[in-house]
């Protein structure tokens, strides 16, 4: 079993029969999503964090009132934030570059080696400081959930309202799928893509006969706690092909009623 330890910044390989951890693999900052490739040779981990924080080095636990910080030691984005501060009364470690490979990234881990090894680190979405519509991005992309196919890895970037398509062999982003709310919502933003199921369409499913394609079904929950929405994304085309909004109650009824599932498939 492959799991991520978010606070420990690691991926663990666990023997489920012996109930024993076989390997610990260091990941990026706050690993969140994890996916296994179809051939089970590679694990992909999405890191949602920006910084790795540490204790204040000058803090004296016996004199907290005198040594604890009452306000942030540095301004966000400053050189001091990156490199740290050392003076006669204060020592605070730097946080480093917000666009470091460890932050807001997808790591590939090779399972074929004797010890699982990180083989690629891919930055997804908009970088911190990169301009979007004339405004520099303050936060990162927050890549969270993954779907791995034979040729591509799809990652939802929660803060960017888009999906990055990574070439599994090259380890590079080859496409970005932008997600937008219904035009009736005007200029509102905040799709916050979060979760991915994957479905391999076969001949015995509800789709027309002789259909042999792969699709991704993206689900997200709007900030206003509104309806769940679905977009069908073709793996081959790497683009959005259908859109339909279905509220939570309809989703539950569809799970309970096979005939309604068939009707929904026919409309797509």
Image (cartoon, rainbow, N blue to C red):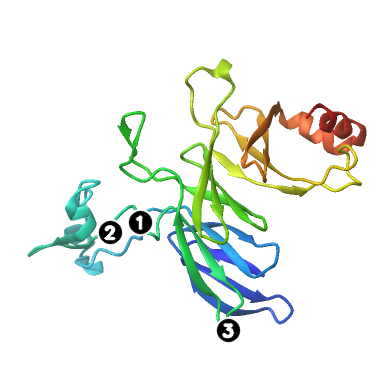
Q: Is residue 164 above or below residue 242?
A: below
Q: Nearer the viewer, residue 192 or 206?
A: 206
Give the quadrant of the N terminus: bottom right
Asked whether the beta carbons under mark 1 and mark 2 sit within 8 Å of each other, the answer is yes
Q: CA distance from mark 3 to mark 1?
A: 30 Å
Q: Position of residue 91 (x, y in %)?
A: 17, 64
Q: Residues within 10 Å of mark 3 (few under 14, many from 20)?
A: few
Horizontal arrangement in the rendering, residue 114 relative to residue 67 (left or right): right
Q: Residue at x 84, y 42 (%)?
A: 211
Q: Is residue 194 above or below residue 108?
A: above
Nearest the viewer among 62 and 145 is 145
The disc at residue 205 is: none
Q: Earlier in the sequence, mark 2 or mark 3?
A: 2
State which quadrant residue 265 falls in. top right
Q: Position of residue 148 (x, y in %)?
A: 64, 56
**Is residue 4 placed above or below 256 in the rendered structure?**
below
Q: Which residue was labeled with disc 1?
A: 51
> Residue at left 67%, top 33%?
241
**C-alpha distance separating marks 1 and 2:** 8 Å
Label 2 sits on a secondary structure element that is: loop
Residue marked by disc 2? 96
- From the viewer's perspective, is 132 left or right of 117? left
């Amino acid at each position: 079993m492959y799991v991520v330890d978010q606070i420990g910044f690691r991926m663990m390989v666990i023997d489920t029969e012996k109930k024993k951890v076989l390997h610990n693999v260091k990941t990026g900052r706050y690993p969140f999503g994890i996916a296994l490739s179809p051939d089970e040779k590679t694990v992909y981990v999405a890191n949602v964090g920006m910084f790795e924080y540490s204790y204040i080095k000058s803090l004296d636990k016996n004199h907290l009132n005198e040594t604890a910080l009452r306000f942030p030691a540095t301004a966000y984005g400053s050189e001091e934030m990156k490199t740290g501060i050392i003076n006669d009364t204060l020592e605070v470690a730097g946080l480093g570059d917000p666009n470091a490979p460890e932050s807001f990234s997808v790591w590939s881990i090779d399972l074929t080696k004797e010890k699982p090894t990180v083989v690629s680190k891919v930055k997804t979405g908009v970088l911190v400081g990169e301009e979007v519509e004339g405004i520099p991005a303050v936060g990162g992309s927050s890549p969270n959930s993954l779907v791995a196919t034979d040729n591509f890895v799809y990652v939802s970037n929660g803060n960017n309202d888009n999906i990055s398509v990574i070439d599994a062999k090259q380890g590079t982003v080859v496409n970005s799928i932008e997600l937008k709310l219904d035009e009736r919502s005007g200029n509102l933003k905040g799709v916050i893509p979060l979760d991915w199921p994957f479905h391999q369409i076969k001949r015995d499913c509800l789709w027309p006969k002789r259909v042999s394609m792969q699709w991704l079904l993206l689900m997200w929950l709007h900030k206003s706690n509104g309806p769940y929405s679905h977009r069908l994304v073709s793996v081959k085309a790497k683009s959005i092909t259908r859109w339909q909004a279905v509220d939570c109650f309809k989703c539950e009824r569809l799970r309970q009623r096979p005939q309604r599932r068939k009707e929904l498939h026919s409309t797509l």
